[in-house]
Image (tube, helix red, strand yellow):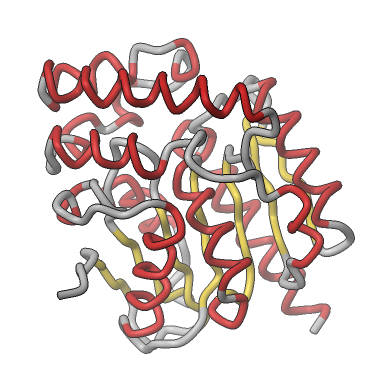
Amino acid sequence: MEADLYVDVRNPGAGLRLALVHGFTQSTLAWAGIREDLSDEFETVALDAPGHGRSADVKAGLRYGAELMTKAVLAAGSGGPAVWVGYSMGGRFALHIALANPRAVTGLVLVSTTAGIDDPSERSTRRTSDAALAEQVERDGLERFVAWWLAQPIFSSLPVAAANIESRLGGSAAGLASSLRLAGSGTFDPLWESLHDLEMPVLVVAGELDSKYCLLARRLVDAIGANADLLIIPGSGHACHLERPDEFVKGVTNWIARLRSEH
């Protein structure tokens, strides 16, 4: 039997559809504030990614997970394609969806994400590191691991309230371990050389304080081409959409409005 992902739909039939894919340790609840800030003209479809939240028992890598997400979003709410918004791990899923099934994607918003690790040795090192993290979460349990995860320097600018720790504790340690082993950054061949195949509009977003992902964001825009735009959110880090939700929502909605005016 094929696994089913948990999907939460708001404003079905309202208009343009946004499919929201969270980052590692998160769930659909991570988008709560952003969904409240979006206007009523958007139908939002948020998913719990494989290994997370109420999809904790779903085991899937990026390719199979992308297939499950595509099927789920096309069938949810009013149905049909959507603008996919993916943060970090969610952005990796969104890229796989856009490349494998572009008809399901009317637009793409990539937040603090990458198209892969170029060097095979570095990919191998990352797989080894993620395997060790999988063992750590299995050993320490969900609550202790999430606290450790959010204490990393990459999240130093993320306020505790914005991190919404409680929303990260609805899954399982086994689910996160599965995600690390199957969908980590070292598990897939880099997609950089395929990015020019993306024909839909793309908005690439990064936080000003996250120097690594600012560089990756500019590389993504250059690799995609003329249909890609860049949004750097001032005074924010890796979780820029959570740290500065007003600026993020304004940037995305302005981008969508401009696209509509041009077509």
Q: On the picture, is 69 further left or further right than 41? A: left
Q: Is residue 79 above or below residue 118?
A: below
Rendered-image quadrant of the C terminus: bottom right
Q: Is residue 174 left or right of residue 69?
A: left
The relative height of residue 173 versus residue 8 in the rendered view (above or below) is: above
Q: Quadrant of the N terminus?
A: bottom left
* Residue at the spot 20% in from the left edge and 56% down from the top edge: 58
The residue positioned 35% from the left and 31% from the top of the image is 162
Residue 35 screen position, x and y as percent: 38, 58
Q: Nearer the viewer, residue 200 or 98?
A: 98
Please name the residue shown 69% across and 28% down the image: 119
Residue 206: x and y in percent read 64, 36
At 31% from the left and 81% from the top, the residue drawn is: 76
Q: Position of residue 53 (x, y in %)?
A: 19, 48
Q: Position of residue 230 (x, y in %)?
A: 76, 46
Query: In which quadrant of the rendered view does residue 98 lie?
Result: bottom right
